[in-house]
Image: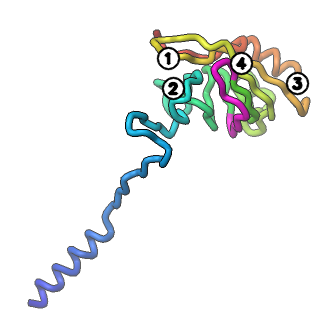
């Protein structure tokens, strides 16, 4: 009898320590026909960016906090003030392979970014271009020139 009780207690303890998976709650304002994805911000009709952050295959994204824009340029800690059908504007950190000699991976440049020129690829709209402003003025001219030579302000797009 003691062995049965002990086995039951061990089984209960092991079961209680197992992984618990909670079903995510639907946002209260979501309709049953709308699928809300955590990386898209919802179906608002605005263009996406093709983001390779954490995924070399890339994925559609809107208002990304971290954004691998091209093989050369990365934006981090992004805060977006606007994300509309024609443009997106935000502020964050800029670094890339073009500025290794300026140590921008450890100390990225604080920039304002504007995404523009939406284009349809495979039935989905994507921003295709970016421009930056350096409000603090801490980005050396050589780094800006290297960035412009690396990707010319063009954003990666998914394969057609």
| Secondary element type, mark 3 | loop
Give the mark, 2 or 4, whose residue is nearer the N terminus: 2
Which residue is labeled 3 in the image? 140
Give the mark, 3 or 1, whose residue is nearer the N terminus: 1
Q: CA distance from mark 4 to mark 1?
A: 18 Å
Give the mark, 4 or 3, whose residue is nearer the N terminus: 4
Which residue is labeled 1 in the image? 124
Disc on res. 130:
4
Give the mark, 1 or 2, whose residue is nearer the N terminus: 2
Q: Are marks 3 and 1 in contact (CB under 8 Å)?
A: no
Q: CA distance from mark 1 to mark 2?
A: 9 Å
Residue 155: image quadrant is top right
Residue beneath the point at 67% across and 24% down: 73
Q: Nearer the viewer, mark 4 or mark 1?
A: 1
Disc on res. 60:
2
| Secondary element type, mark 1 | strand
Q: Residues within 10 Å of mark 1 (few under 14, many from 20)?
A: some
Q: CA distance from mark 3 to mark 1?
A: 36 Å
Looking at this view, name the residue that lies furthest to the left. Answer: 1
Residue beneath the point at 27% across and 71% down: 14
Give the mark, 4 or 1, whose residue is nearer the N terminus: 1
Q: CA distance from mark 2 to mark 4?
A: 17 Å
Looking at the image, residue 117 lies above or below residue 17: above
Q: Is residue 80 magenta?
A: yes
Disc on res. 75:
none
Residue beneath the point at 71% across and 38% down: 79
Name the dominant secondary structure of the magenta segment: strand
Q: Nearer the viewer, mark 1 or mark 2?
A: 1
């Amino acid at each position: 009898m003691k062995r049965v009780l002990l086995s039951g207690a061990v089984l209960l303890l092991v079961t209680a320590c197992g992984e618990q998976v909670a079903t995510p709650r639907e946002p209260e304002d979501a309709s049953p026909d709308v699928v809300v994805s955590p990386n898209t911000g919802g179906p608002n009709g605005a263009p996406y960016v093709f983001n390779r952050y954490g995924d070399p295959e890339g994925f559609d994204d809107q208002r990304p906090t971290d954004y691998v824009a091209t093989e050369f340029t990365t934006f981090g800690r992004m805060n977006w003030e606007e994300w509309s059908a024609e443009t997106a504007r935000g502020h964050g950190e800029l670094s890339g392979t073009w500025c290794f000699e300026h140590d921008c991976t450890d100390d990225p440049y604080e920039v304002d970014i504007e995404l523009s020129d939406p284009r349809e690829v495979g039935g989905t709209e994507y921003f295709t271009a970016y421009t930056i402003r350096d409000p603090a003025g801490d980005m050396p001219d050589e780094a800006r020139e290297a960035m412009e030579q690396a990707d010319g302000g063009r954003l990666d797009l998914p394969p057609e």
